[in-house]
Image (cartoon, coloured by chain):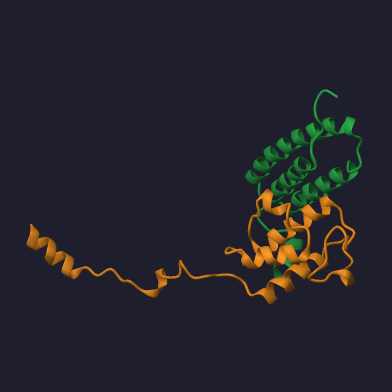
Amino acid sequence: MQSLRSAVLRQIRVPVGPSCRFLSAAAQLDKAEVIDRILSVVKSFPKADPSKVTPSSHFQSDLGLDSLDNVEIVMAIEEEFALEIPDAEADKLDSCSAAIDYIAAHPMAK
Amino acid sequence: MTAASPSAAEVKALFRAFLREARKFPDYNIREYVKRRSRQGFHQNQNIVPELATAAFAEGRELLEVAKRQAVVYSLYAPKVKNIMELKHVEKQ
């Protein structure tokens, strides 16, 4: 039995290719790209004036939006980067810079 | 006042729940309607007096349950082809 087992095991080869080694790769996005995409999301928001949108602008005090618009922008950012932001985090994203920092540090953002 | 009026965080969470629910509708027209209607409802009641806020919040919660049920129903009758508006959106990306 033991010899049969070793004979079989000698024949079987489990391929260990690079295809299963991607799991630990850091997949964070490039900061410049994040800034670009977040600004375009904010600019395409109907109530925001595109000329006023800069990486440092605050949604409510600089762009004249209210807290409901803020929720909508965070949802739009979620859709852009294909992730789900929990409520506690979403409430903190009240400016372009906060959103950029959050997305740039997020491992799942695409 | 019998019941405490809802806090800003609770209202935002409800609004977010509506927008999340809206995403689940497979039909473009219904999906956009639910989004539009949620926005409209919340913006309409934005400056509501505290006495009426509790009732409006309760109504919103009931409507969220309706939206959840309808999302399930509409998912059973998903359109076989995409709406032309969605096709354009895909092309843009």
Nearest the eye: B66 or A62: A62
Q: Where is residue B8 in the image (x, y as percent from the top left)?
A: 80, 42
Residue B3 appears in which quarter of the rendering?
top right
Q: Nearer the viewer, residue A33 or A89?
A: A89
Left/right of residue A65 with respect to residue B67 in the rendered view: right
Residue displayed at 65% across by 68% down = A104
Residue B43: give x, y in percent of width and height.
Answer: 88, 46
| Quarter the C terminus of chain B occupies | bottom right
Quarter occupied by residue A23:
bottom left
For residue A72, what is the image quadrant?
Answer: bottom right
Image point (83%, 30%), residue name: B55
Where residue A19 sits: x, y (%)?
41, 72
The picture places residue B29, in percent across and down from the top left corner, at: 77, 52
> As displayed, is residue B72 above or below residue A14?
above
B93, B3: nearer the viewer = B3
Chain A display color: orange
Say if residue B93 shows up in the picture.
no
Check the rendered structure and report the hue given to chain B: green
Outermost residue to the top:
B2
Residue at x 75%, y 35% (from the top left corner)? B61
**A109 relative position to A7: left or right:** right
Q: Which of A4 and B60 is in front in this view?
A: B60
Task: State left or right for residue A51 relative to residue B65.
Answer: right
* Quadrant assignment for the N terminus of chain B: top right
Q: In this view, does B78 lie above or below A83?
A: above
In-image side of B56 versus A102 (left or right): right
Residue at point 65% right, 51% down? A86
Count all numbered tags in the image, as a single digit.
Answer: 0
